Image (cartoon, rainbow, N blue to C red):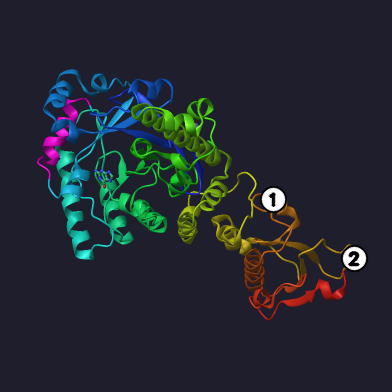
Amino acid sequence: MREQFEIRDHDGAGRIGRLSVPRAGVTVETPALLPVINPNVLTIDPERLRSEFGVDALITNSYIIHSTDRVRERALEEGLHDLLGFDGAIMTDSGSFQLAEYGDIDVTTTEILEFQHAIGSDIATPVDVPTPPDVDRERAAADLETTETALADAAAVDTGEMLVNAPVQGSTYPDLRERAGRHAAGTDLDVFPVGAVVPLMNGYRYADVVDVVLGAKRGLDPDCPVHLFGAGHPMMLALAVACGCDLFDSAAYALMARDGRYLTVSGTEHLEDLTYLPCSCPVCADHTPASLRDAGDAERERLLAEHNLHVTLEELRRVKEAVRSGSLLELVERRARGHPAMWDGYRALLDHREQLEATDPVSKGTFFSLSAESARRPEVARYHDRLDRLSLPESLLLTVTKPPSEHEYDAVWRVKPPFGPVPPALAETYPLTAEAPSRPNTELCRAAADGVARLAREHPTTEVTFAHDDWEATVLDRLPASVALENLATIGR
Ligand code: GUN
Ligand code: ZN
C-alpha cells in the first residue's frame, strides 16, 4: 500500500488522485502539471505560479543548482523554497538529462540525493540512465541495470520525509519497461516517472509513447503515482492521462515562448503566422498577435510563456473533468483528430483495450460512437465478453430497426452498432445508451456483427435470425452459417 497516493476516480486507465507530499505539507491533486523552473532564468515568477495559475508543484534541476557556485550556496543557506520564492511542493531532477545529453556528469546518486535533501527538495530523483529509443536490446538492458543500482543507492540514503522518484527506463522495449516497472514498484521509493520519452515526443512518435507507458504500467502496481518525464504539451495530455499518467512536467511552455511559439490543444503555432488569437486567457484577452509581436523580447517571451501555461493548465482541467464524467476517450479522440501522429497514439491506446478495461468503471456518462476506432473501445470488448451471461429463448429475432409489433419469434431484440444485440431490459443501461451517427458506418456495423456472431456461438440451441438493412456482404460474412439472414431493404419494410 502506498499511503501517499489516493485514487478518487477512474476512466479507463486514467484517474484523478491525490498525492500527499509530506515534506511540503501539500496535497497535489492529479493529474498535475509541474512547470519546469530554470533557477537561473525565471520566465514567470514562481510566486505567481501558485497565486495566479493555481500551481501546487513545480520541478527544477538540482544538478544545475549544484554546479552553479553562487546558486548552490544560496540554496544550501536559504533552502530551495526561499530561493525560488515558492511555497508549494518542489520536485528536483538529478542531472540524468544532462547525462543523456553530454554523456557524463560529476555526481553520484548518493551525493545528489543528499544534496537534494540538504536544499529542502520535496521529491528527489536519483541518477537514472535515460536510454534513447531504438538502441539495441543489450544496451537497453545494461543501462537498466545501472538505473536499478541507482534506485538501490537512493533507497539507502536517509531521506526523511522527502519523497523519492524511481524512474522507469527500458528504451523502446515494452517488456523491458514492464520489468523496470515491476522492479521500481518493488522498492520502497514513492513516485514512478517513465523516462526517456522526450526523443519520442520530439519525433511525434505517440504510438511508441503509448506502448512504452503501458509497458511500464503493466509492471507497476495500480496504486503507484506515475510521472511522464518531460511531457506537458497540451495536445497530448488527454492521451497520456488515458494511459494512466498522473504527473507531467513542462519546459515546453517556456522554451517554446523563447522562439515565438504559441501552444494550442491541437499543436504549436508560430506567433508570426497568427492573425487572430484563438484563446481567451488573460494574455490573449488583452493582446492581438500584432501587439505581442511589437512587445520587447523579454516581455513577449513572458507573455507567450503565460499563455502557453494557461492553455496547458486549462486542458488539464478539461481532462480531469472528462475523467470525472467518464468521457476521457471521447476527449482523446477529439485531440487525436488534431494531428495524424496523435491518431496513431489513439489507435495504439485501443490496441491495449484489455489493459484499459481492468480499471474502467462499468457505468459512466453517455458513450459516443464517433469513428471506426470507437468500435475498439474497452466498453465494446467488455460488452461482447459478457454476452454469454444472457439467457436466450428458443427463437430470437435480432433487428437493426424498430422491432415489428407482430411476429412469430419468442423474443425480438434490437442490434445497436457497435455493441450488437441489446436485450430490452438492458437498453437503458450504460454503455447501450450510446449515441451513434444515424448514417451507417461499416466499422461500427462490423463490431455489431461480431456481437451477433458471439451471441449465436455462445447459445447454440437458440435459433437466431438477423434482420439488417442492406448491410455489406463483408460485414455479414462474419456471422456463422447458423444465423438466418433477412434483408429489410428488399422485404420493403
Ligand atoms: N527528464 C526528461 N527525461 C528524463 C529521464 O528519463 N530521467 C530524468 N531523471 N529526467 C528526465
Ligand atoms: Zn491565451
Q: Amino acid at mark 1?
A: Thr
Is residue 192 depicted above or below 472 in this figure? above
Q: Along the horizontal axis of the image, is 416 left or right of 8?
A: right
Image quarter of residue 31: top left
Q: Which residue is mark 1?
A: 433
Q: In the rendered structure, which segment of residues is drawn in magenta?
A: 105-120
* Image location (x, y in percent) of residue 165: 26, 40
Binning the other alpha carbons within 10 Å of mark 2 as few (below 14), some (14 to 19) or many (20 upward) gives few
Q: Along the horizontal axis of the image, is 461 left or right of 103?
A: right
Mark drawn on residue 406: 2
Q: Quadrant of ligand 1?
A: top left
Q: Confirm whether residue 158 shows in the render.
A: no
Q: Amino acid at mark 2?
A: Glu
* Image location (x, y in percent) of residue 439: 73, 61
Instruction: For marks 1 and 2, give the CA distance.
Output: 25 Å
Find the residue positioned furthest to the bottom.
Answer: 481
Image quarter of residue 450: bottom right
Query: Quadrant location of the C terminus?
Result: bottom right
Is residue 344 depicted above or below 329 in this figure? below
Is residue 55 depicted above or below 328 in this figure? above
Of residue 473 and residue 300, the one placed in the foreground of this image is 300
